[in-house]
Amino acid sequence: MTNFSELNVSESTLRSLKRMGFEEATPIQEGTIRFGLEGRDIIGQAQTGTGKTAAFGIPLIEKIDPKNPAIQALIIAPTRELAIQVSEELYKLGYDKRVKLLSVYGGQDIGRQIRALKNKPQIIVGTPGRIIDHINRRTLKLGDVQTLVLDEADEMLNMGFIDDINAILEHVPAERQTLLFSATMPGPIRKIAEEFMKEPEVVKIKSKEMTVENIDQYFVKSQEREKFDILSRLLNVHQPELAIIFGRTKRRVDELAQALSIRGYLAEGIHGDLSQAKRISVLRQFKENKIDILVATDVAARGLDISGVTHVYNFDIPQDPESYVHRIGRTGRAGKSGLAVTFVTPREMGYLRIVEETTKKRMTPLRPPSSSEALVGQQRIAMETLADIVTKNNLDDYRTLASELLEDNEALDVVAAALRALTKEPDDTPVNITEERPLPMRRSGGGNRQGGGYRRDGGGRSNNRRDGGRGGNSRRDGGNRRSSSQSSRSNSGNGERREGNRRPRRRES
Ligand SMILES: Nc1ncnc2c1ncn2[C@@H]1O[C@H](COP(=O)(O)OP(=O)(O)OP(=O)(O)O)[C@@H](O)[C@H]1O
Ligand SMILES: [Mg+2]
């Protein structure tokens, strides 16, 4: 491990890092900060949760001239929540230097952003749609930008975003430093990236597996209609502190969040059809542990750094191996451990194998717990609750009643009864989960796949490019009754991309 001071980081930034509690550089930070400070273009790839934000953030902050009121750096991120998070981390990194930042993203009052832009921020973090919106309104002047960052670069350069990125690039000087970071970087995307970079230094932190080692990865093979009951049992056995459950579509997420609430879990859904205020409030509640379970589409798959996420459940297996890597990467961050469970229907086993080939990691088959095993989980929670009350609470007001009870009953029976009263017994309140169609059949073992598992079929591409996102009918995002190529067209609209079955386009302004 290397100290930041050995990486030629300025005193001011060292002070900010100290405030953040960062003592030593992570491998990706060690590998990129020097090149970054030299002004080199960088493609940085390292596992999820290993500090890529500061890897680009530190050299970026170092380059800002605090006396220059112009926008000097632009960071583009695929989702609004990620743009907010990255701007928060950059704010901390630039705290000592007092750099001025602004995040611009869809769903927030544009007038407010325009007023904030007049305060001369030096760094802008934004989502593509809203950045373009500001460029078109001439409220965002990018002519002095020296550093351009694409966080989640492969996502930003896939066909869902590439047109937007190209449009933005037209307004950024060609003389600039370009930094691209992601945990995944499929070969074909890297080629696209290199076209608009200057002799980029490719820094890839080598690891046996693409996923983080300290995430235990399991799969459950089950029929579609059995998934929800198995999920509830798993939740009872695992008792996650904070869990994220990923579903394939917005409808899926709504139904799952509702079904979990009916069964007594503290769960909320998040997806692109919700208002921005709602999205922010759900995420805040989750971060503050007011809800235990976040049910999400891929809108929450990339980059979000929420401490304390112990479990990730893929209620639907993701279609792309990259999506799998990012989804499960919401746990096991910054050296912590995590557990991921992926549901797969028998017809979708080919996808599971493709994921494993890409990540170079086998998932362990998990036997679904029986209802009595799930009950034991709940009984243990009751026991812990009771023990906790004994140690923490003042029981004076209850002692008289307790001795009354003990006059007529055995102590063991009284405690057992208290446990029973506290145990959440299996709940079979009916819930409504519409069956998803399995993904189209796919077999693994295609050695012809380029770039370590990247596959995009041309069929979806032209669809996506043309009409997605131009105010497409976002209500039709269910998509699950259509073939995959059809549904790609129908998804998008006001949310983010890729919340239906196939890569849709989106526009988030
Ligand atoms: N040098 C460091 N020392 C201690 N903590 C760090 C250090 N660098 C980053 N972190 C913390 O590690 C966590 C993960 O960092 P970050 O979100 O940048 O990961 P990432 O590599 O971008 O992940 P993802 O691929 O999911 O986007 C954050 O909470 C961050 O504050
Ligand atoms: Mg990141």
Image (cartoon, helix red, strand yellow):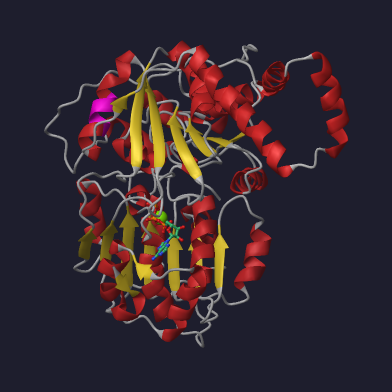
**Which residue is situated farthest in the bottom direction here?**
67
**Magenta portion: prevailing SS class:** helix
Q: Is residue 138 visible?
A: no
> In the image, residue 396 lies at what x, y percent?
85, 38
Considering only vertical position in the picture, is 84 above or below 225? Answer: below
Determine the residue located farthest toward the left in the rendered image.
Answer: 447
How many marks on residues?
Answer: 0
- Quarter in which the N terminus is drawn: bottom left
Between 54 and 21, the residue placed more toward the observer is: 21
- Spot the residue most to the front: 407
- Name the side, left or right, on which 461 lies relative to 239: left
**In the rendered image, the vertical position of residue 449 relative to residue 49, given as above or below:** above
In magenta stretch: residue 479: no
**In the figure, 342 relative to 106: above or below?**
above
Q: Quadrant of residue 465?
A: top left
Magenta highlight range: 351-355
Query: Can you give x and y, in whole percent of width and height, for residue 15 in the image?
Result: 48, 80
Where is residue 394 drawn, in percent x and y?
Answer: 80, 42
Residue 229 x/y as whole percent: 51, 16
Q: Residue at x 39, y 48 (%)?
A: 161
Quadrant of res 451: top left
Residue at the image point whose x is 37% and y is 31% from the top: 318
Horizontally, residue 228 falls left or right of residue 47, namely right
Q: Is residue 191 left or right of residue 318?
A: left
Residue 352 belongs to the span the image colors magenta = yes
The residue at the point 48 percent across, 52 percent down is 305
